[in-house]
Image (spheres, rainbow, N blue to C red):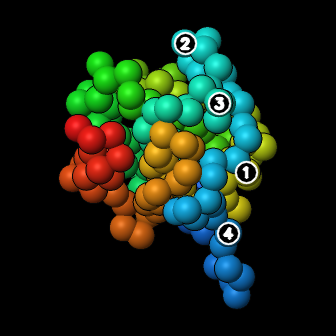
Amino acid sequence: MRLLVTVVLVFLIGCVSCIREEVGEHIQYIQPGDALPEFMVEMNDGTILDRDSLRGKVSVLVFFHTSCSDCQRELPVVQQLYEVYAGNPRVRIACISREEPEKEILAYWKSNALTLPYSAQSDRKVYSLFSEEGVPLVYVSDTACNVRYLFTDNPIASFEDLCQAVSSLSGD
């Protein structure tokens, strides 16, 4: 019985981690046409990612939490995109966690054979510059760091959606 209660609680926590609270309030996002906000994160390889490092590149920034079921469906799609553009110096793809520690992300990456670059964030400081609630969020920005595409969980972006967005901005 105790195991059943634990399993149910873990499931409910996972579901709550990716939904938005839409109780009569409008959720704010950085929108297409907006400039990327000033931010800085350390990536899992030790490099620094910030708005200035994205200037001159098409960027795909993905906000996620590994216990979110929509993120679990979106991350393999982003992995496919990463594999297509990994050798292209004009395209930068990076994942940024929403309040999730490195240890959990690394375990998820390993168990799902992900090679995407990521930044583990223990709080919502960076995330809150982009949105109030909800993951996954995928921002595709042009070389001037202006957001051109925003994909949320309604519906999550397909591989074709992401390829079309990146190729329209990169000329590939």
Instruction: State the CA–CA distance, disc 3 to disc 2.
Output: 18 Å
| Mark nearer the N terminus (1 vs 2) | 2
Q: Quadrant of the C terminus?
A: top left
Identify the residue at horizontal 55%, vertical 51% (top origin).
146
Mark 1 residue crowding within 10 angstroms, few (<14) / some (14–19) / many (20+)? some
Q: Position of residue 107 (x, y in %)?
A: 48, 24
Instruction: Name the mark nearer the viewer: 3 or 2.
Output: 3
Question: Where is mark 3, residue-wise?
Answer: 52
**Residue 62 rendering spot, x and y as whole percentages:** 50, 44
Which residue carries the number 4 mark?
28
**Where 97 falls versus 150 (above or below)?**
above
- Element carrying mark 2: loop
Name which of mark 4 and mark 1 comes first in the sequence.
4
Residue 90, by quadrant, is: top left
First-in-chain label (2 vs 4): 4
Residue type (three-letter) at the residue carrying disc 2: Asp
- How far apart, in angstroms, are the residues tagged by discs 4 and 1? 10 Å
Which residue is the extreme one toward the top?
46
Q: Inspect this view and state whether residue 71 appears.
A: yes
Residue indicated by mark 2? 45
User: Which residue is labeled 1 in the image?
Assistant: 129
Marks 3/1: CA–CA distance: 16 Å
Q: Is residue 134 above or below residue 121?
A: below
